[in-house]
Image (cartoon, coloured by chain):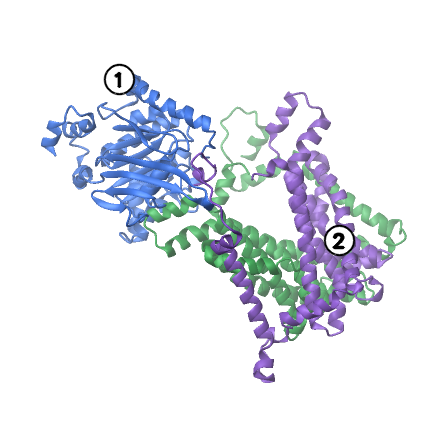
Amino acid sequence: MHCKVAEFTAHAGYQQVKTLMNMTPPLRDERATMNTSTTQRGALSIRNVTKIYDPEGVNVMAVDNCSMEIAAGEVCMIVGPSGCGKTTLLNAIAGFHSITHGEIFLDDALLCGPSKPKAEQAAERMVVFQHGALFPWKTLAENVAYGPTVQKTLRKKQALEKARDMLSESGLGNVVDKYPGEVSSGMARRAEIVRALINDPKVLLLDEPYRAMDALTKSIMHESLLETYDRTKVTIFFITHDLEEAIFLGDKVHVVTTRPCQLKKTVSVDIPRPRSYETQSSEQFRLLMDEVNEAVHEEAIKAFQAGEREMA
Amino acid sequence: MATQYAGGTTGHRIEAPTGLALLIYRLKEALSTPKPYLMGFGVFLWLFTYWLLCEGLKLDRFDKIPGPVAIAKEWFSYEPFQGISFFTAEYYDHILASCRRIAIAFAIATGVGVPLGLFMGWSDKIRQYIFPILETLRPIPPLAWVPLAILMFPGFEAPVIFLATLASLFVTTLNTMLGVQSIDEEYFRAAGCLGSSKWDIFKNVVVPGALPYIFTGLQISIGVAWFSLVAAEMVSGDLGLGYLIVDAYMNNVTVPMVIGMITLGFVGWFTSVIVRVIGNRLMQWQVKELALQGR
Amino acid sequence: MADVAQSSHAHAVPRKRTRFEKFRQNESLRRGVTAIVVFLLLWELGSRFDEIFGKAWTLPGIGLIPPPTDVAVAWLGVLPKPGYWWSWVASFRRVMTGFIAAMVLGIPFGLMLAVNKYFRDIFFPPFEILRPIPPLAWVPASLIFWPTNEMSIAFVTFLGAFFTIVINVLGGARTIDVRYLRAAQSMGASQWDLFSKIILPGTLPSIFTGAAVGMGITWEVVLAAEMISGGGTQGGGGLGFFIWNSYMGGSLEQIVVGMISIGIAGYLCSSAIRWLGHYFMPWRRLF
């Protein structure tokens, strides 16, 4: 890994890995050493994926021959107009539905392909949903403890203890016993990410998780996610249509076309980590914005003219 | 402490009242609006009109219906002229008989309807087989089953319970099924990617997710059960409030008839409150969420 | 998935399928038909169990019910008789009388309760006291009060639907979004405009919900009232009387015929309400 990084320093995609190596914050590294493998695992490879829906004989092509490579420990942002098939791609990775053609690999293991159109759902790929899917009938702690309990990796009592600890670490210590309906949407979303992370996943799949939030809450959520990422270095597959969010969080921004979803352009974000909100006012940030904006705007117009109903 | 709130202008920092102080505070708040007085006036107006028509003016036809004074006198008398009062054992026999039947019918309907509805909502296959049969039978009013029920089941008790069960079974099953279908797909997906087995999903997503609908259904279902029970008791019973009403009618005593009606209303209301309270206890998460939304 | 399925897009390639193919591929329809056929077969078998295996094998409950084939034969027998159709007419007339009276009185009353706070405070408590009393409990009292049987049946039917409709109208009118009212006011709407253009259409969905539920109750009440009071000769027939009469006459097949007839009648009525709702609320026709 080291020599590779040295060779490809010019390649922006590995910039992040480089920063990682240079950074080495010794204080936080207890967790990092515990999960030394995290940077080595969680590479996603999407090869020529096509998805055609066939509800009642009407063929709709949602994804068309889409390929992308996501390195282990990378924050990969997928940007595209509403209803373009980004979610379809995420659902295929998560195993919520099958693909028509192509293959998806996770760390060289086949998730789905011609022989197995639908991936199995497993805790190695955790999803954080658009509207939030914390069970409203369980408290935050119970929600977080749910994964380890049903996977039988921990006893219920131990799982609850661990859940409380992890929630406290994320600054949710005083609401662990509240129901999701009682806390703010920002807190709920943070708890949902904790619920995903407690399972030590290889990939975190986020489907526009901050969509319904106001700008102020959003910026806090971004910082919190970045902080979490710096700690765990989990691979993140993040769907959004907020360009600032995409550049601020991501290592790479993949712009996809309107339906059917295809990769249009990949922009590498070589802003060093750790990033703070001041990054967003830098010249480099603005230039990247322009670059991405140009690619997205064209697609947005196409999508708008197609008059497609937006996903609620 | 309470005076502080009543004063309101003391300028001190106001703390949220708790316990008894909260109760007094709420009472004072309530009494400072015209609402309770208007409500009292409304009930009074209604009772007065009733009295005026039946006892005051003794209008034609209205004089056949016992007025509020006559009913109250009879209801609270130790030796009721027409046989039924608070102090006769017979009155409680009727109430108990009806309540027992409702309890049995409601228990059967819930015990069968809730699991059936859960499975119907959960599995497309089960729903596609059972739903058409239910939909075919449902338009037939439960009361149309009265003669068949009398023929099919021996004795007085079984047909009556059968009718009450039948009525609430449909409501409970369909509401439970709707409840499962109303659960957001994302909860199933979330549970799936957290590594749940089918049984885990059933226990942790299907059942709690359907609970609000189940309890809405149960509240309707107990109302429907009373409705059918009364009809069944009127036609075929030998005890119970429905029978009390029809028996009084047959014997030309009108006061027990009205007492029976009022008692039915009260008992029916009370049972539905019990169902609601149980529901709220089981669904703390929903109660708290709604409270925060100010509902 | 829904995001993609909702729109027919340029990529949509419709395929034509024959009706038979559709039936074969429509699993839910196929299962439904199978279930009903199996249900009828079991019923037939259960009822005829004693005929097949001898008298000692009469099954409890179902063994006493006539089998569906006998019911069908009995139905064919009554179909040409005018008396059967007069029962339909009589029941329909009663249902309509009670139902329309309940709508005519219930909708304005419910709207008044919703619109005027003082009216609600005064008249809602007595309403709530009377509401839990099951409609059928009113039957004897109304028999005493009203001069004719027909009037007392109409009264009880009215009560049954009235409470449901009022509660639904009140609930519907009170959940209308205040923003609609403010928007209308800002465009210069008068009080009457507010009522007729916002409150009334805003309440329509609940009115139709209430009407559908009320219609179900109305049929139950009419049926019961016919069985309880119309059992005598002066009741003037009706499907409830048809059932009761068949019961008294010991014709089990006709009881079931009556039950199914009432089921069909009730279903027709609720379908009519659904259709009307569809017609009057074009904005609710989503597809």
Marks 1 and 2, how far apart at CA: 76 Å
How far across and how far down the image is residue C215, in percent?
Answer: 69, 51
Horizontal side of residue B60 vs A141, given as left or right: right
Q: Nearer the viewer, residue A29 or A98?
A: A98
Q: Which residue is mark 2?
A: C95
User: Any idea which chain is the green one in this picture?
Assistant: B
User: Any idea which chain is the blue one in this picture?
Assistant: A
Q: Residue at x 23, y 26 (%)?
A: A274
Furthest toward the top, the residue is A283
Q: Nearer the viewer, residue B171 or C109?
A: B171
Q: Which residue is mark 1?
A: A284
User: Any idea which chain is the purple one in this picture?
Assistant: C
The image quarter containing residue B251 is bottom right
Would you place residue A288 above or below residue C117 in this image? above
Q: What is the quadrant of the C terminus of chain B in the image?
A: top right
Chain for numbered disc 1 = A
How far across and how far down the image is residue C213, in percent?
Answer: 66, 50
Callout 1 secondary element = helix
